[in-house]
Image (cartoon, rainbow, N blue to C red):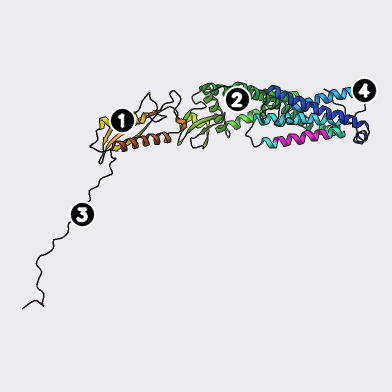
Amino acid sequence: MTIPPAVDLSTLLASLARPSSLIELAVLAGVLLASWLLVWGLRRSLQDPPDHRSIWFGAHLVDGVLFPVLALALAYVARRVLLDLGQPLAVFRLAIPVLLSLVAIRLSVRVLRLAFPASALVRAVERTISWFAWLGMVLWVTGLLPAVLDEMDDIQWKIGAHPITLRNVIEGTLSAGFVLVVALWISAALEARLLAGAVGAQLSLRKVAANVLRAALLSIGLLMALSGVGIDLTALSVLGGALGVGIGLGLQKLAANYVSGFVILAERALRIGDMVKVADFEGVITDITTRYTVIRAPSGREAIVPNEILVTTAVQTMSLADRNVLLSTVVGVDYATDVAALRQRLIEAIAAVPRVLQEPGPAAQLTGFGADALELSLYFWISDPENGQGNVRSEVNLAILDLLRREGIGIPYPQRVVHLPAQPPVNAFKAPSAESAP
């Protein structure tokens, strides 16, 4: 696709004032309407949901990538037809650069939102890209772009023995940004395909493959962009050496977390969905990234644990080989209770609790002769610790209490013997007083 050369601003304004511009406006309105109808029809035929994770189709049809791409293509075709008919152009000299800028903005914004949905910097990057795109369009339309580029060529410096100009830096940045956006787009599409329908260990393995694929695509894209603008990659050897020293000194913790993340994902010792306990925090692993792991507790709190901690410290996992978890509770009964008969009734009452497993089944054991009661330890298994343990233990205790009340078995209170100090004896005979003397 070729873009018509820029014209003088006064000439362009005079062309827009001609009556023939109304014909162009009508054609442009038809192009935009046709693009909107095509996007609407494609969304209905593909049954694409109107969410914000769609790159081609936005939430409101026109904020996706497909609408400005179709509008730009149809506008270029309409421009060629008008030129063949001898129609002077004014509106389309503005419309095509505007649509081209809109394509660049929509593509970068949609890809960045898909690749980094939770990043707070995406909004600032979106605004920066939009400002640069519209500024470039204004400079091109007003004819100032060639003069600005010439001035940039005059500003230069050297990196090693290779001269670099300000124009090279800006063009390299734009090229690198475009290549990185395309690489992110491809990696996001491949990641969605890899992670679709994956669970457990398969999900963790595909997650590490997606991370490696994204890093490789971004690295290759960046090297291609730098080579495309004429930057000698050997000049980056000094930067690579400095980066290596920085990783070895100041960034060693960060590097250790990234390496630990790849080790966790590759060995599959911890997987998404596992119930684990790290230090004093217990919960379900909801995400494993290359730097940290997210653990969600049954209470709803989430802990972001650096991967290095998971590799270098002991981690209790309840679902690596067997998801079954043993829980216990203790109850005291009177010494006069028939323990043999009560044990069987307790096992039946515990087995009736919904989340308690039947195999292995509950068990009741006489574990102690207390000062006040016989102590019975009750054991039972569950297979879904991620749904909480305190709630099922409470249900078991309620079932035990209900059974003891129905059977008339008391839970003894603590008994204490109180010793009172001995009182001195009262004298039966009193000494005679002076008044009573004869």
SS at circle 3: loop
Would residue 314 be visible to someone looking at this image? no
Q: Which residue is mark 4?
A: 85
Q: How far separated are the C-alphas under marks 1 and 3?
A: 43 Å
Quadrant of the rendered structure where residue 179 is? top right
Q: Which mark is residue 211?
A: 2
Residue 378 percent location from the top left of the image: 33, 32
Looking at numbered disc 3 in the image, what kind of residue is underneath it? Leu
282 relative to 433, above or below = above
Q: How far separated are the C-alphas under marks 1 and 2?
A: 55 Å
**Pick the front one: 335 or 72:** 335
Q: Is 159 on the left-hand or right-hand side of 116?
A: right
370 relative to 325, above or below = below
Q: How far separated are the C-alphas under marks 3 and 2?
A: 77 Å
Name the dominant secondary structure of the magenta segment. Answer: helix
Residue extent of the magenta highlight: 125-138
* Furthest residue toward left: 438
